Image (cartoon, rainbow, N blue to C red):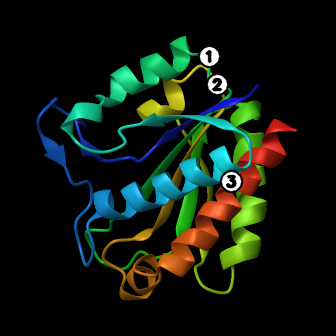
Amino acid sequence: MALVAVDRGHGWGNKFLWLYDSGAVGLVVEAEITLLLASMINIKLNYDGIETFPIRVGGKETARLLWRGIQLANNKKCSRYVSVHVNSDIQKSGEGWELWIRKDDIHSKLLASRIYEQLNNTIKDKMSFRGIKETDVLQVCVKTQMPACLIELGFVNSEKDVELLKSISFLNQCARAIVNGIKDDLK
């Protein structure tokens, strides 16, 4: 049976065990959006019969440091690792969504492609796509031992993106699309 690690990106225990890491802050707070989105993804995956391993799910008592969450996901032999984030741009001109994967990793590229297909079909008329990008620095992409994808869903300082990110309906649609992409990759 598949086990999918779902990382909310920011929140409690990101840097120090008792320190709250808000992530990007602009017209919204990244950690608040990612908590909601990751929770929706976890619930939908569970509902569809896929077991999840939530990383950094909430309050201090459930917090996991990022590196520790990755280590636990590796030890549990998770099938996939998905990390949800909201981007920021100092110049306040960025908007849209993008996917990040480990450089030269065909399995992560397949996961990202399947998430892209589902998410793009759902939000292409609402939010622009910035590409599937490769990295050799982002921990969730390079330290995981399973296909991994980091999703940057919009920008905290883009009025257009934030209007969407404040919509429960929009986040719910995104969560369903992400789940469908994960499920397509698990087939």
What percent of the width, then of the height, locates residue 149?
59, 43
What percent of the width, then of the height, locates residue 53?
52, 32
Residue 169 placement, left or right of 29: right
Give the residue pinned by disc 1: 77
Residue 40 seen anywhere in this rendered image of the structure: yes
Mark 1 to mark 3: distance in Å? 19 Å
Between 129 and 74, the one lying in front of the other is: 74
Q: Amino acid type of disc 3?
A: Val
First along the sequence among labels 2 and 1 = 1
Numbered label attached to residue 146: 2
Q: Could you tell me which residue is drawn at 30 percent across and 62 percent down?
A: 32
Label 1 residue SS: loop
Q: Amino acid type of disc 2?
A: Met
Q: Amino acid type of disc 1?
A: Lys
Q: Could you tell me which residue is drawn at 25 percent across and 79 percent down?
A: 27
First along the sequence among labels 1 and 3 = 1
In contact (CB < 8 Å): disc 2 and disc 3:
no
What percent of the width, then of the height, locates residue 104?
68, 31
Residue 1 placement, left or right of 132: right
Residue 130 seen anywhere in this rendered image of the structure: no
Give the residue pinned by disc 3: 179
